[in-house]
Image (cartoon, rainbow, N blue to C red):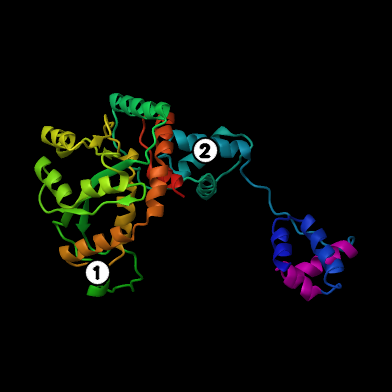
Amino acid sequence: MNSSLRDFYRTLKYPTSSEYIYSIFTNYCNRKVEPTANALGCAKKTVRAAIQYKENPFEFVHRHPGPEPMLKAHHIFYIDMMTMCYPRMSDSELAHLLVETFEDLNHCGHSTVATARKSLEYQYGPPRHSVYLSQSAKNKRVEWCQYHLQQGTSFDNVVFSDESWFKLGPDNRWMHIKKGDYSPDVCAPHKKFVEKIMIWGAIGKNFKSELVIFEDNVTAENYLASLAQHNFFSDANQHYGENQWIFQQDNARPHTAKVTIEALKADGINVLEHWPPYSPDLNVIELVWAIMKRRIDARPKTTIDDLKRVIQEVWDELSFETINKLIDSVQQRLQLVVEKHGETIFSNELKQMVH
């Protein structure tokens, strides 16, 4: 019972909270201060103040509400609009502009603007990276998404695939370092040329392929040979039924080469057609690579063999629950691309779809 009393109390504001405290004090706790404080999870002096407020209202000293906020609603709206239009404008510049624009604002400091921007959920940092999309590319993305939305395409039998580079870099996790300490334990050596390997993988509903490691550049020939060697096609046929699944791949040259297209056609592999250009945000495996890289960065590794081992461990740990959430998010991705008129979906928008 105490937990429900406490939870409800936390939703109240003064003076309603004082009324509630006094009610619990008189009706449930036999007018005892300490049991009342324990039941509500508040301080004993808070209970005593509520009692004084109810029983001696003329002697009760009301708490000062504090100074009125400097910025009113119209000031906050102006800060929001100016920040959207001029994201590089500094806090000091915007504070100066506020005072010049509004007669009801005599002064305003940069920290006041910074606080307002924070309350509006702005974050100060470098520009976000996104793929440049021509209007033609945006149109193709919208057309492709609209087509599959109108057709009501189910992606439950689509296997999404792609390659990604994994680098053997220093461990850049933050640590506590004493001033002046340059011992090897706290230094991350910088390499001019970072060793890296190319990994290919594929995921579908309740399906995860074997990982393929490419030691050399990916060509149409070694692409097909490696997938066959790692039983990708036979595993997919076994999981979904003989040629009852659709193979997604992007427009990289090894994927769209004539020899690749002819080989897939000869084996009866259905390919997801007309994949739109510059659309990694529509390929659900891209978020898998991002998740894996964060986990891999947190694990010790010093050689390429260590890196391969850690990549395989993290891939094996990838759950079907996570994969299925990603597959289920495809329809939302299509809808969002249409709503954004073909613009790229940012990573924070993608993450919201799978949580």
Q: Which residue is drawn at 29% across and 27% down?
A: 137
Q: What element carries label 1?
A: loop
Query: What's under tag 2, amino acid-wise?
Result: Asp
Specify the segment rendered in magenta: 33-55
Q: Could you tell which of marks 2 and 1 lies nearer the N-terminus?
A: 2
Q: Nearer the viewer, residue 1 or 36?
A: 1
Determine whether 236 is above or below 306 in the image: above
Q: Residue at x 45, y 46 (%)?
A: 352
- Report crowding for label 1: few under 14, some 14 to 19, many 20 or more residues within 10 A (C-alpha): few
| Res 15 seen here | no
Query: What's under tag 1, amino acid-wise?
Result: Cys
**Label 1: which residue?**
187
In the picture, measured across the screen, residue 284 lies left or right of residue 355, that is: left
In the picture, measured across the screen, residue 22 lies left or right of residue 138, that is: right
In the picture, measured across the screen, residue 307 lies left or right of residue 72, that is: left
Q: In which quarter of the image is residue 279?
A: top left
**Label 2: which residue?**
80
Q: Residue 211 carries which label?
A: none
- Disc 2 to disc 1: CB gap under 8 Å: no
Position in image of residue 288 (x %, y %): 32, 51
